[in-house]
Amino acid sequence: MKLDRCAYAAGAFGCAVALVALAASAQGGAAPPATALGAASDCTGPDVVMGEVANVIDGKSFRLADGREVRLAAIESPPVTAAGPDDAHSHAGLAARAALEGLVLHRQVAARAAVASDRYGRLIAYAFIAGPAGEILLQQEMLANGHALLSPAGIAPSCRTALRAAEGAARSAGLGLWSDPYYGIRQADNPAGILLDQGRFALVEGTVASVRERGGIVYVNFGRRWDFTVTILKRNERLFAGAGLAPGRLAGRRVEVRGFVEERGGPAIEVVRPEQIEIVAGY
């Protein structure tokens, strides 16, 4: 299928909306209920690629009819794995994929590139479909239904605020992933529990016990025995200080950290952007 491309300029937003809406009208299909876009209209990129979705790979990626793969920016979803006798949680990845299929399969999508293609050749983008009240941002919809987690690094502030609100609403309502304690927020004083997420994106909450520096790395330690550690490159310290999260001032604060869990003599998350750390309200 031939793809239309709109250069990102003053009229690109309208171009994308018109093309997606026209395609939906021609297909005669009813669009799913739209999540209010609000400030998420700032979730955008330098150009727009239009195409029909041929198949959905998992809860954060799909393939267009011309073979190009689109990976949704700013979110993470559980992997799609074959269910085994000891895997009671494999359904989450399948549910996330099914949710994305319900939104986009065989529909026209406007993909706005967030960054250049990744090393796998995937287009990293914010993606939109037409809805009865305007555009539906797929990332916002997946978060609002509890089928994804926000990965906020490098996102425009207003976009991040809108996506965080969508995730927060799903958390409060116990939707999707948030209905299963396995996918809830890990506690920093339970290292064994955190290591269940080794290699996966997770949220960890706890009180910072101490902050140390060694060999160009700042170690933010949690628990009396350093049960969990957040690492920050020393050269990035000013970036965190500029966001009001100077590592040296985090001791005694209760924070929530997002990132991929590693095993470094215990569970750890490397933090590269201040958006990955949030002070827990009331602390």
Image (cartoon, rainbow, N blue to C red):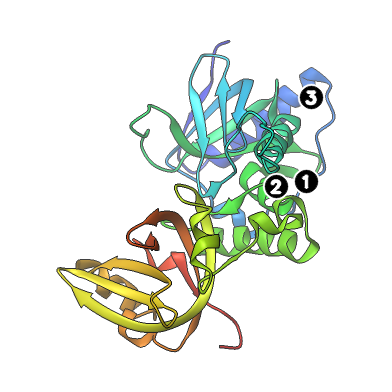
Q: Assign a secondary structure to mark 1.
A: loop
Q: Nearer the viewer, mark 2 or mark 3?
A: 2
- Percent x, y of residue 236: 25, 67
What residue is pinned by disc 2? 141
- Percent x, y of residue 75: 55, 48
What residue is pinned by disc 3? 25
Circle number at residue 85: none
For the residues bearing labels 1 and 2, Cβ distance under 8 angstroms: yes
Instruction: Give amino acid for label 2.
Output: Glu
Q: Nearer the viewer, mark 3 or mark 1?
A: 1
Residue lying at 66% horizontally and 39% vertically, measured from the top left: 87
Front residue of 40/248: it is: 248
Dot 3 or dot 1, earlier in sequence: 3
Front residue of 251/110: it is: 251
Dot 1 or dot 2, earlier in sequence: 1
User: Disc 1 versus disc 2: distance between alpha carbons?
Assistant: 8 Å
User: Disc 2 versus disc 3: distance between alpha carbons?
Assistant: 21 Å
